Image (cartoon, rainbow, N blue to C red):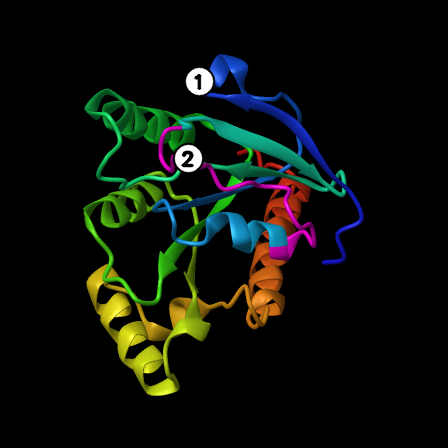
Amino acid sequence: MHVKTVEFIKSATKPAHYPEGELPEIAFAGRSNVGKSSLINVLVNRKSLVRTSSTPGRTQLINFFNVNSAFTLGDLPGYGVAKVPLAVKKQWGPMMETYLSSRPNLRGVVLILDIRRTPREEDLQMLDWLRSFAVPPLLVVTKCDKVSKNEREKQLGLIAKTLAVQKADLLPFSALSRDGQDVIWQRIEELLAAAENSAATPAITP
């Protein structure tokens, strides 16, 4: 996808404040410091559309962007920071569950994982939610330039085993070299096309 325009819409924490509209939505989720901001900035070809907070995990807002007037990009708050206050941690789960279960135009979630880390409880919880609410996940593994080729293959196998998915389901990515961005865009476009085809299919009445 050639991104021509990206516009910030608004931030929200609850359904009443989500932006209205019929555009399909793709959300991005992952642990803090997993490279989510870098991935989004590379995909939309902007240097600092999404900024990294100086206090990761404290900003518990969902940020919405309009991309090419074709779909909405939802930037979900990062999770898993040890120093975040307990009250903030408790807010994350209900907010994510509410968003994933109540956003009718959500067509998929890009779940981001660090090649150097084994998926943890929050990652598994997010994937469980996606499966429960029938939201297709795109599993992107970032920072692949930080490990050797052999280590990368070893870690991809470990991550796949931990998530109970096929190794082929993982999409390796490097923000430094931009390797993997074309495949990620292809998968996102497939989700958007599936949503468009579904909307265009007339209902069959008995």
In the rendering, at what x and y percent does residue 54 appear? 44, 37
| Residue 160 vs residue 80, the one in the foreground | 80
Mark 1 secondary-structure assignment? loop
- Measure how far apart labels 2 and 1 are at the Cα level: 13 Å
Mark 2 secondary-structure assignment? loop
Q: What residue type is labelled 1?
A: Lys
- Residue placed farthest to the right in the image? 4
Earlier sequence position, callout 2 versus callout 1:
1
Identify the image quadrant of residue 59.
top left
- Magenta stretch, main secondary structure, is loop
Q: Which amino acid does label 2 sit on?
A: Pro
| Residue 154 vs residue 129, the one in the foreground | 154
Q: What stretch is highlighted in magenta?
A: 42-58
Q: Which of marks 2 and 1 is in front?
A: 2
Work out which quarter of the rendered image holds the N terminus and state it.
bottom right
Task: Reply yes or no: does residue 200 show up in magenta.
Answer: no
Question: Going by the image, does 145 lie left or right of 202?
Answer: left
In the rendering, at what x and y percent does residue 197 appear? 65, 49
Residue at position x 44%, y 20% in the image: 13
- Residue placed farthest to the front in the image? 54
Residue at position x 62%, y 49% in the image: 192
Residue at position x 28%, y 49% in the image: 123
Residue at position x 39%, y 85% in the image: 149
In the rendering, at what x and y percent does residue 196 appear? 66, 45
Whether the residues at callouts 2 and 1 have beta carbons within 8 Å, the answer is no
| Mark 2 surroundings: few (<14), some (14-19) or many (≥20) residues within 10 A | many
Residue matched to label 2: 77
Question: Going by the image, does 51 lie left or right of 53?
Answer: right
Identify the image quadrant of residue 65.
top right
Which label sits on residue 14? 1
In the rendering, at what x and y percent does residue 184 appear? 56, 62
